[in-house]
Image: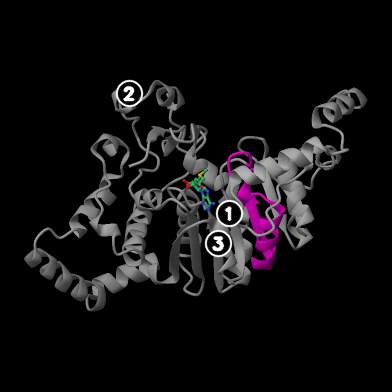
Amino acid sequence: MKDFYPYITNDGSVGLYSKEFDDIYHSTYGAYAEAWEKFVLPADLDFYFKNYKEINVLDICYGIGYNTKSLVQKYYNDTIHSDNIKLNIKAVDTDKELMFLSPFFTCCAKRKPKDENLPTEKVKHLSSDKIEKQYEYDNFINLILIEKLAQKFPDFLTKDFLKKEYSAFFDKMSVNLYKNRIADTPLRAFSTFLHNIYYLNISTRYKKALKALKIGAFDIDYACDDARKVIKEDNKIYQLIFLDAFTPVKCPCLWSVDFFKLLYQRLDDNGRILTYSNSAQVRNAFQAAGFHVGKIFNERAGKYTGTIAVKNSSFIYYPLSEYDLSLMKTRAGIFYRDENLNALNEAIIERHKIEVENSPLISSSKFIKEYRKEHQNV
Ligand SMILES: C[S@@+](CC[C@H](N)C(=O)[O-])C[C@H]1O[C@@H](n2cnc3c(N)ncnc32)[C@H](O)[C@@H]1O
C-alpha cells in the first residue's frame, strides 16, 4: 500500500493525502461535493438524457471514483423511470490500487472518525471539524463498482487491501459484501458459484431488483494506464469528458495542447469537457486545440470554479472575460507541448520553462499590475 492518508472533508466524504506527492487528491471543501459541482452539475446531463439513447463518458483520472460515483447517482436519480438511456463510463487512471479501493471509501460519513485514526499532523490539519452534507449518496453505487471491478479484474477479489488502519474510513456495507465474495474454502466457493448462477440467471427477485436499479443500462470499463495511451488507442466518441488530473505543474502530460487535440478528436460535436482548472495556460491550450472555451460558475460557492471546453459554442454559458483573454496572451498562457504524447512530465516541464524564459510576451505579474492600474476595481 502506498502512503495514502485518508481524512474527512467538509461534506463527510473521504479525501486522500499522498505522502509521495505531498499533495491532496481531494479538496477539503468536500470531495463528493466537488465532483457534483465541478463535473456533474455543469455537464448539463438533462440535455443528453433528452437527446441521446446512449451516453459515453470518459473519466480521466478516476482516482477513488467520486466523479464517476456522482455521475452514476445523478443517472439513477434522473432516469429511474425511463428504460432507454444507456450510460457507458470509461474510467482511466494509472493507479490500480486506488481503483481497487474506490468502492470502499465511505461517502458522507455521519460522524467524523476519531482523531487518533489520523496518522499525521498534516492530515489532522486537513480534516474538517464540521461536516455539512451537501449531496445524497446511495450505498448501492459502491456495491455496483465492486461488481464491475470484479468483472474486469480477476485479481480484484483476491487482494487483501482493506488495511485495518483505514477501516474507520470505509463503507462497512461494501466491505462486508466484498468479504462475502471471497470464498475461503473450495466447498464454499462451489456453493457461492451455484448460488450466483441461480441468483443472477433464474431468480425473479434479482431480475426485478436489476430492473429497479437499471444495472443493465449502466456500464463501466476500467483502464489502468497512462490516459494518453488509453485514449490514443480508443476511438470511441464521448459526449462528456471529465479531466481531473493533478495540477498542471504536477502532471503536465494531461494538460498539453497535444493531449487536448487528441481529446478534440474523441469529443462529440455536442460534447463537453469539464475541468476544475482556471489556469490561463489550460484555457489557451484548449483554444489552440480548436475548442470554444468558457468558465464554470458554482452557484453554491458564488464563484467561478473551472473551465469548460466544447465544439458547440452555444454551450458556453459563462464566456471568458476580457481579463481572462488578456491573461492568456501573457507568459502565463504559454502551454505545455507533447507532440508524440509520450514525453515524461519532467521533460515537458523543462521544455516549457525554456519556452517561457525565451518568450517575448509580457509576464503575468506585470500584466496584472498594469491591468489593475487601468481598471481600479479589478
Ligand atoms: C486529483 S487525483 C483524481 C481524483 C479522482 N477524480 C477522485 O475522484 O478520487 C489525480 C489522479 O490522476 C492519476 N494520474 C496521474 N497521472 C496520470 C496519467 N498519466 N494517466 C492517468 N491517470 C493519471 C493519479 O493516479 C490520481 O489518481
Q: Residue drawn at (64%, 63%), measured in percent from left and top?
A: 47
Asked if one can make out residue 90 in the rendered structure from this viewpoint, the answer is yes
Query: What is the span of residues highlighted in magenta in the rendered image?
Result: 248-277
Residue 249 shown in magenta: yes
Residue depicted at x 9% and y 66%: 186
Q: Nearer the viewer, residue 279 or 378?
A: 279
Mark 3 vs 1, N-terminal side: 3
Quadrant in which residue 376 is drawn: top right
Is mark 1 in CB contact (under 8 Å) with mark 2? no
Q: Are marks 2 and 3 in contact (CB under 8 Å)?
A: no
Specify the quadrant that holds the N terminus. Answer: top left
Q: Is residue 336 left or right of residue 165?
A: right
The residue labelled by disc 2 is 115
Residue neighbourhood size for the residue with mark 2, other residues' Cα within 10 Å, grouped as few (<14), some (14–19), many (≥20): few
Q: How is the image coloured?
A: one colour
| Label 2: which secondary element | helix
Give coordinates of residue 303: x percent, y percent. Answer: 68, 36
Q: CA distance from mark 1 to mark 2?
A: 33 Å
Query: Does 90 appear in magenta?
Result: no
Q: Is mark 1 within 8 Å of ligand 1?
A: yes
Residue 153: percent from left, percent from top = 34, 63
- On residue 242, which mark appears? 1
- 300 left or right, relative to 212: right
